[in-house]
Image (cartoon, grey):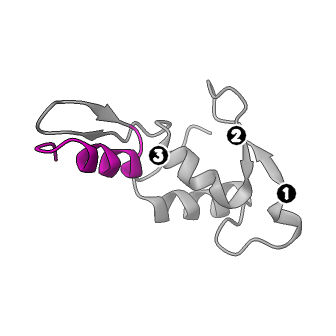
Amino acid sequence: CMMHIAVEHKQVCKHLQQHHGVNTTSPTSEDMQQTTCLWTGCLGAHMKLENLPRHIFKLSHLGVRWICSTCGVSLSREDAFRRHALERPGCQ
């Protein structure tokens, strides 16, 4: 959809529930099945429904990036950024 989404995980969940009827916070057993991302330009990523907000937020649909202030590497996921900082002394 073309609606504004705040760049916060909580707001992505709220948007999905209010505007698309997708409950990602307390999925039922029916909701635990695989779903497909319908974001324009996404290559049909398959995932558990509960992982959809993370996919939207952290996999660049919202343009969220973590940039290392030392070496300048740009990463799309916070866990990858933390791993980068741990593996490379001096990076942060």
Badge 2 crowding class, 10 Å Cα cut-off, few under 14, some 14 to 19, many 20 or more, is some
Q: Nearer the viewer, mark 2 or mark 1?
A: 1
Mark sitting on residue 37 = 2
Of 12 and 77, the residue lying toward us: 77
Real-space Cα separation, disc 3 to disc 2, in angstroms: 13 Å
Real-space Cα separation, disc 1 to disc 3, in angstroms: 21 Å
Residue 68 picture quarter = top left
Q: Secondary structure at mark 3?
A: helix
Residue at 50% x, 37% y is 61
Q: Magenta stretch containing residue 11, yes or no?
A: no
Badge 3 crowding class, 10 Å Cα cut-off, few under 14, some 14 to 19, many 20 or more, is many
Which numbered disc, 1 or 3, marks the residue that appears first in the sequence? 1
Q: Which residues are magenta?
A: 76-92
Real-space Cα separation, disc 2 to disc 1, in angstroms: 13 Å
The residue that label 1 is drawn on is: 33
Q: Nearer the viewer, mark 3 or mark 2?
A: 3
Disc 2 residue type? Cys
Residue at 55% x, 45% y is 56
Horizontal side of residue 25 vs 64, given as left or right:
right
Of 10 and 69, the residue lying toward us: 69
Residue contact at pointers 1 and 3, CB within 8 angstroms: no
Q: Magenta stretch containing residue 86, yes or no?
A: yes
Horizontal side of residue 74 vs 54, given as left or right:
left
Of 25 and 5, the residue lying toward us: 25
Expressed as whole percent of the image width and height from the top left, the position of residue 40 reads 63, 28
Quadrant of the snapshot with the N terminus: top right
Q: Secondary structure at mark 2?
A: loop
Expressed as whole percent of the image width and height from the top left, the position of residue 76 reads 40, 38
The residue that label 3 is drawn on is: 58
